[in-house]
Amino acid sequence: MRSPNVRRTCVALAAAVSLTAALTACGAEGDGDRDATAEPDSSTRTGLTVAFLPKQRDNNLYFTNADLGAKTVVEELGSVYEDFGSSNATDTIGQNSYIKMLRRQEVDALAVSAVHPAKLCTELKKAMKQGVTVVTYDSDTRPECRDVFVSQASAEDLGRTQVRLMAEQIGDRGRIAILSGSEGAENQNSWIDCMKDELDKPEHKDVELVEIAYGDDDPDKSAEETRRLLRKYPDLKGIISPTTIGIEAAARVVSGSAAHKGKVRVTGLGTPNEMRAYVEDGTVEAFALWDPAKLGELTARTALALSSGRITGRRGETFKAGDMGEYTIDEDGVITLGKPQVFDKGNIERFDF
C-alpha cells in the first residue's frame, strides 16, 4: 500500500495522541512543576474557577458532551465551571484571545482542546507563568505549553482500529480515502500516521489510500469534500473519517446517494446518537469512539488535582479520579482515558450520547 503525503512513524506516537509530544519522547520527562512536591492524599480544593476552551464550542455534539461531563464534576466538587470558544475549529486567533482573556481574569485552571500544537504556546506559557494550571484535552499542544495532556486513547489504538474496521467492511481490497478535520489538528494527524502504518502491513497490501481530504470540522464543507471524493474516484470503496463532524457528513452523503449507498463504506470516529440511523440503514457497519463525557470528566478531575497540589504533572505520578479509578501520568505528561469503543448494530442501542 502506497499512501500520499510525507510519512511519520506511528511507533513514535504510541505513547500519546499528540505528534509534538511524541517527538520529544527521547529526551524529556513530563513537564509539570519540577520544583513542586505532589501531595496525593491532600483534599481537592473548592471555590476554584475552571475554564474550558473546546476546539469547537458550537454545533459540535462531541464537545457539548465533553463539556457537560466536565461541568458536572467541577460543580459537584465545589468549584465554578466556565466554557468559552469559537464555532470555527481552525480559529487560532480566537483561541488565543480567549486564553488571554481568561489569564487576565485569573482563572485557577484552564482546559484547552488545541486548534494548533504551536500557535497557542505564547499565551499558554504566560498563563502558566502567572500560576494558571493548564491542561490540554482531545488535541494537544507542545508539552512545554501545558502541565498535562488528557488523551482520549493512544494514537496507535485509534489509527489501527479505524483501518481494521474499514478493512473488514471492504474485504481488505480497494481504494479508500480519509476525510479529516483541519489540516493542523495534531490529534487527527497522529491517528492518520498510525492508519498509514497499519495500511503498510502485508494483510492490507490490496488497500490503497488515494487521498486525505479536509472538511475543517464543518458539516457543509465535509459533505462537499465527500461528494468531491466520490466524483474524483468513481471506484472508491470506503471513507474513513477520524472526526465526529466528518463521519456524519460522509455517511449522510453516501446514504442519500443511490449510486453509492451499499457500495461505499464509511467508518471512523462518531457518536452513537448521530450515527445510529446510518448503522440501521447499513451505510455504516461499525465505527469507534470513546465516551466524550468521560473525557471531559477526567480532564476536569485532572485540572482540579493539579490545582490542589495532588499531582504536579511528573511522569509516574498517580491519582484517583473519583469513581473513574486510578490514573497514571505517562511520558510527556500524558494521561490516557482508555481504549476506543467499537459500535455496531449489535450494541449501539446500549449507548446514549
Image (tube, helix red, strand yellow):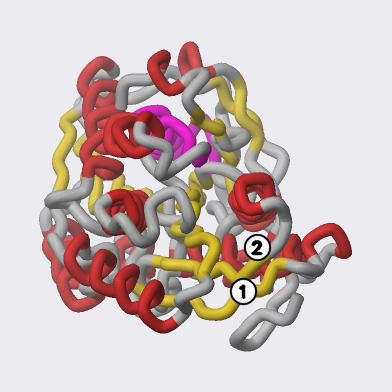
From what the image shows, is residue 289 above or below residue 145? above
| Picture quadrant where residue 306 is located | top left
Closer-to-camera residue (75/341)? 341
Per the rendered image, the range of residues in magenta is 286-312
Q: Which residue is mark 1?
A: 209
Q: Residue at x 64, y 41 (%)?
A: 329
Instruction: Indicate the amino acid at tag 1.
Output: Leu
Q: Give the camera-side residue of 310 and 327.
A: 327
| Tally of numbered discs | 2
Q: Position of residue 262 (x, y in %)?
A: 45, 49
Residue at position x 61%, y 29% in the image: 327
Q: Amino acid at mark 2?
A: Met
- In the image, is residue 288 part of the stretch drawn in magenta? yes
Q: Is residue 20 above or below residue 167?
A: below
Determine whether label 1 and label 2 are within 8 Å by CB: yes
Q: Is residue 77 above or below residue 160?
A: above
Image quarter in which the C terminus is found: top left
Residue hosting label 2: 195
Residue pictured at 58% horizontal, 66% vertical: 192
Q: Residue at left 72%, top 40%?
A: 316
Question: Mark 1, mark 2: which one is toward the viewer?
Answer: 1
Q: Is residue 97 placed above or below 40 in the rendered structure?
A: below
The answer to which of marks 1 and 2 sits earlier in the sequence is 2
Q: Which SS class for mark 1?
A: strand
Q: Nearer the viewer, residue 24 or 36?
A: 24
The crowding category of the residue bearing disc 1, from other C-alpha atoms within 10 Å (few below 14, some 14 to 19, many at least 20), is many
Residue 249 can be seen in this image: yes
* Local SS, label 2: helix
